Amino acid sequence: MLKSIGLAFALLSWLAAAQPISAQRPAITGISHITLYADDIPKSQQFYQSLLGWDMVPAEPATSGTRFYVNHLQYIELISPPSPQPMDRLYSVGFSTSDAEALRRFLGAHGVSVPKAITTEPDGSRSFMVRDPEGNRVQFTQEGSHPPPMPASASRRLSSHIMHAGYVVRNRAELDYFYKDLLGFHLYWKGGAKEGDIDWVMMQVPDGTDWIEYMLYLPANPSRAELGSADHFAPGVVSVADLEKNLEQRGWKPPANKNPQVLGVDGKLQLDLTDPDGTRVEFMEYLPVKKPCCSPYTGTQPSPPTSPW
């Protein structure tokens, strides 16, 4: 009997090991949040709340840890930088998962250094943080039982969804092992400033349409301005032309003698803003308006959210 039990256990263990990684890993559905360093958080409040129209939580005062909600799941979090200040303004990027604890165990079983336990936030969300092979902080968050309610100001939002986040990458192969092989991200598009170059690689989450963007073109010792442009995030819009009109109605002025609307080599129209600390906010249309350069899209195109919040 003991022999039979041992054989049954061995068979179950073999079956579990034989499962593809995708069957063992909980769903990763999209971008959860981006945490940025901010030197003057009340000044940043004017940008994220007054100009972009995102709801600030808590409502007052604007201090380290303040969040600006794009929708009930996605937000930008601002924290005060340590001393001495890092040149990079990006602290971490967060992704939504269906089961934070299961994902923590999964990554730990595959050699990733994980915390001993997950963290539970006041809103009931559960999360943990790891570092990718290049040291970038990556957080995984499971939705809580009481997310923030839809604010009365929700209609002021210039965008209601963050489509992607980009950050500096030096070794694509190492990052692919973590994001593609372990986490199940897949290629969405890749291209460069000129034909034949690969400066940008977009990797889409396995269970949604959001993506991350490897920024591969930076010099060995980038300036703060170069880092601020590369380490960016992209809110989605239906029309950048309408976005520009709304921005101007709120007092924003485009650069002199320059059309702020740009057609990217990926075939999508965009309009870039810069927050008070130099982080680029790349407003981008959900759908391409022309065939992309360099390579075709190989993932599902995003679409505007249907939920009001």
Image (spheres, helix red, strand yellow):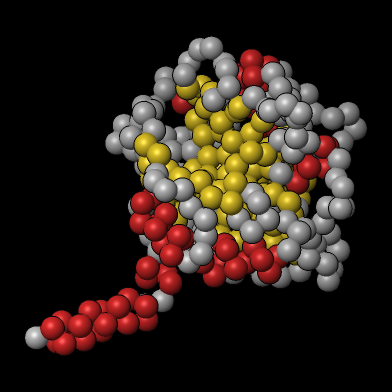
Image quarter in which the N terminus is found:
bottom left
Coordinates of residue 212 in the picture (x, y in percent) = 61, 54
Q: Residue at x 83, y 52 (%)?
A: 218
- In the displayed structure, 269 sits above or below 179; it is above
- In the displayed structure, 199 sits above or below 283; it is below
Residue 131 visible to the viewer: yes
Q: Residue at x 71, y 22 (%)?
A: 39
Name of the residue lying farthest toward the left: 1
Classify residue 286 as left or right of residue 306.
right
Name of the residue lying farthest toward the front: 2
Coordinates of residue 219 in the picture (x, y in percent) = 87, 52
> 43 or 292, which is in the foreground?
43
Classify residue 121 as left or right of residue 51.
left
Image quarter in which the C terminus is found:
top left
- In the displayed structure, 131 sits above or below 299; it is above
> 233 or 12, which is in the foreground?
12
Q: Could you say which quadrant of the image residue 308 lies in?
A: top left
> 79 or 149, which is in the foreground?
79
Residue 155 visible to the viewer: no
